[in-house]
Image (spheres, rainbow, N blue to C red):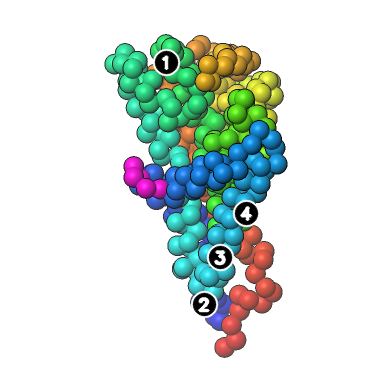
């Protein structure tokens, strides 16, 4: 306070930055985790509701996401008049939903295994990053799968939750993570989930539509800071992004491919089912060192996203403040 003026504390902005910092330091615990508990609850609900049809899957998605949003709204309401408590609530939720540090650590472990030509170890690690079958992947395809997963999960596990947190606070953080978790559980193109998982997949597509493109844009913006190719990222994103079967993942993977000057895409096998995907980028096939370069690029994108999210939250808080609320009479 100076000359009768009270500075409004941007609690959401502070909380987003604190939660991002907490993920850098602590990452996901190896034991219990709130998202894992949510997933177990959804798995139990699936066993009760499952049918080879869209409505039961939509009911599960609607109930789970609404419950997560209501929990976030409760936290928001309880902490409303106490900025420090509000910031702590946002920080805790942000830490719980971010996965950038865990993503980087697993990817670097894969790179280390490939350096040692320890393919069994690299194959054992891959399921923590993506759902493709690792059993018959050679070194090059393991490296490609890891780089693609780093790119896609930079959007899903970092940029998207930060964006939703900036726009909607704790309810946005928790609801987004519920959507993304359900997509990971149910959004597969398999006989079991083609209908039941339809709502989960489509909801996740909608929730990531803007964040995926924001991730690609941030990739272009920060590429020079980590020695990557900004022009290549822009070119591959605009030329190749729409060739991917996902409306979102292709944009990010193409931007990473162009920035790293590698070639992504090709045939992937999921639960014995092969998917043939278009080539993204113009470079050589990725190797272990390209995984590390992808991690450095992902971390730079994450930092930029955290700063952008905090700035957006602060601007929204200032814009929503009642007129005259920043002054106190003498």
Asked if the residues shown at circle 4 and circle 3 are in contact, with their CB atoms under 8 angstroms apart, the answer is no
* Residue at image point 41% right, 39% down: 101
Depicted 274 relative to depicted 188: above or below: above
* Marks 4,2: beta carbons within 8 A: no
Span colored in magenta: 29-33
Distance in Å between CA atoms under marks 2 and 3: 34 Å
222 magenta-colored? no
Residue in front for this viewpoint, 25 or 34? 34
Between tags 2 and 3, which lies in front? 3
Query: Which residue is disc 2 drawn over?
Result: 2
Q: Residues within 10 Å of mark 3 (few under 14, many from 20)?
A: some
- Distance from disc 1 to disc 2, alpha carbons, whole Å, reads 65 Å
Q: Nearer the viewer, residue 57 or 24?
A: 57
Q: Earlier in the sequence, mark 2 or mark 3?
A: 2
Query: Mark 1 or mark 4, which is nearer the start of the sequence?
Result: 4
Q: Which residue is mark 4?
A: 66
| Label 2 element class | loop
* Residue of label 3: 74
Q: Earlier in the sequence, mark 1 or mark 2?
A: 2
Task: Report the side of 76 relative to 21 (left or right).
Answer: right
Sort mark 1 into few (<14), some (14-19) or many (20+) by Cα contacts within 10 Å: few
As drawn, the label of residue 135 is 1
- Tag 4 secondary structure: helix
């Amino acid at each position: 306070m100076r000359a009768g003026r009270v500075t409004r504390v941007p609690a959401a902005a502070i909380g987003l930055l604190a939660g991002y910092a907490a993920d850098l330091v602590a990452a996901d615990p190896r034991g219990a985790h709130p998202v894992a508990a949510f997933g177990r609850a959804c798995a139990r609900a699936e066993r009760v509701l499952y049918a080879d049809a869209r409505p039961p899957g939509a009911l599960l998605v609607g109930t789970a996401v609404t419950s997560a949003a209501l929990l976030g709204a409760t936290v928001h309401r309880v902490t409303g008049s106490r900025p420090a408590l509000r910031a702590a609530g946002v920080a805790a939720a942000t830490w719980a939903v971010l996965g950038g540090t865990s993503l980087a650590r697993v990817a670097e472990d894969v790179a280390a295994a490939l350096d040692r030509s320890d393919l069994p170890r690299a194959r054992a690690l891959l399921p923590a990053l993506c759902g493709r079958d690792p059993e018959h992947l050679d070194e090059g395809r393991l490296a490609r799968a890891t780089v693609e997963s780093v790119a896609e999960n930079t959007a899903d596990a970092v940029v998207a939750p930060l964006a939703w947190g900036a726009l909607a606070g704790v309810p946005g953080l928790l609801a987004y993570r519920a959507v993304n978790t359900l997509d990971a559980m149910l959004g597969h193109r398999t006989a079991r989930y083609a209908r039941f998982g339809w709502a989960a997949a489509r909801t996740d597509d909608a929730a990531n539509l803007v964040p995926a493109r924001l991730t690609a844009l941030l990739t272009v913006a920060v590429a020079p800071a980590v020695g990557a190719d900004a022009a290549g990222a822009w070119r591959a994103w605009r030329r190749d992004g729409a060739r991917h079967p996902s409306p979102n993942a292709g944009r990010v993977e193409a931007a990473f491919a162009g920035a790293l000057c590698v070639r992504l895409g090709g045939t992937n096998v999921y639960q014995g089912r092969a998917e043939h995907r278009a080539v993204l980028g113009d470079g050589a096939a990725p190797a272990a060192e390209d995984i590390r370069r992808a991690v450095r690029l992902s971390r730079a994108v994450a930092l930029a996203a955290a700063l952008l999210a905090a700035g957006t939250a602060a601007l929204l808080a200032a814009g929503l403040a009642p007129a005259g609320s920043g002054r106190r009479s003498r």
